[in-house]
Image (spheres, rainbow, N blue to C red):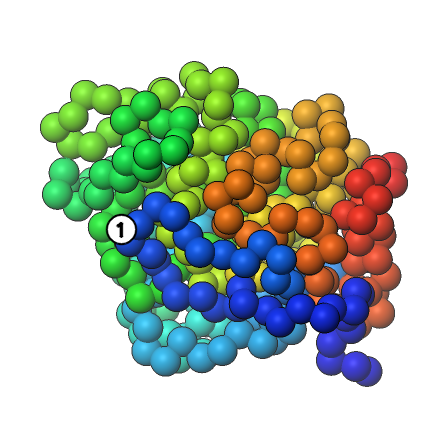
Amino acid sequence: MERRRFLRDASYATGMMLAPSPLKDFALASNSSATAHVAFVKTTDRAAGVRRALDLLNVKPFQGKDLFLKPNFNSADATPGSTHQDTLVALIRQLKARGAGPLTIGDRSGMGKTREVMESKQIFKIATELGARVVVFDELRAEDWEQIKPSDSHWQQGFALPRLVRNAGGIVQTCCLKTHRYGGHFTLSLKNSVGLAAKFVPGQPYNYMQELHGSPHQRHMIAEINSAYRPDLIVLDGVEAFATGGPDTGKLVQANVVLAGTDRVAIDAVGVALLRYFGTTPEVSRGTIFEQEQLARAVELHLGVSRSEHIELLTGDRDSAEYAKQIRSILDGETNLN
């Protein structure tokens, strides 16, 4: 069987694959007309799905890079409320198999104390067994945070990201597939980056997350956090998804998919199409996919592709190809199938 099945012919040269990470300034040079490859694997086996997706994407060796790995540990709720341990373990093993050097796992929970969330998810045990380091962002010192004040953003005082993330040799993130009932509308790869940003910087009284969640510009601000770094790899675990509700609980559907890519806009556009396929919230269903505010602002910031036809879905088997064809029709026609 053909190892790659291209669902759309492409005449563009990809400039998005494994771009250097991170950039030290706010503006990112990104070609919004380049083709973004998204591996699309239909599966109920997370470990196999991660491996197959990375093979389809033809991820190059990391050649000893020290990688920072951002999961979704917003809470300790069962997947898709948070990253599944099987997904995390499989991803770490695949990164190591591709020559990754030191691995650091880090996050900040929004619905619980981060250390307690990580303990509940057995992350310290997993990291010890696999030779990775864990950093609890809540416990960082003031000097460990870097203040980022872009001139053109909706953040009143800018936002702060850990220096260890900004200085990492590469950044990998793994996100879930779900909606967000607290104003984000959906929480995929762009929204997963909120866990990188500080709620408080030690010694400062300002509550950045209070500003975010109280702002009418919340979805724009989510995209703006992403301008502070560029990922080398994104893996979306959509084996299970919340079609409504979220981020901790919601209407559970068996989406049976793992996605991988390097373009956050492309990953999230495919994710929104998947949510629409299963019947989602009015907010996520409204308008065209690229009119969703998180995506529209990300496109303005040149964080990824600007049109659905610049997304190419890669599959390696008939079941995945047939499933991807249905999602492709939603991407292209901007309509719901259900």
Identify the residue shown where x is 53% and y is 74%: 59
Q: From where the camera sits, is residue 186 visible?
A: no
Relative to 337, does residue 128 appear above or below in the rendering?
A: below
Residue 298 lies, in percent from the top left, at: 52, 42
Q: From where the camera sits, is residue 18 visible?
A: yes
Tell me the amino acid under the disc marked 1.
Answer: Val
Question: Which residue is at the front of the view, 307 or 211?
Answer: 307
Element type at marker 1?
Answer: strand
Residue 210 lies, in percent from the top left, at: 36, 20
Q: Is residue 154 left or right of residue 66?
A: right
Identify the residue shown where x is 80% and y is 40%: 334
Q: Quadrant of the C terminus?
A: top right
Q: Quadrant of the N terminus?
A: bottom right
**In the rendered image, which residue does mark 1 sit on?**
135
Residue 76 lies, in percent from the top left, at: 45, 39
Q: Quadrant of residue 159?
A: top left
Identify the residue shown where x is 36% and y is 27%: 155
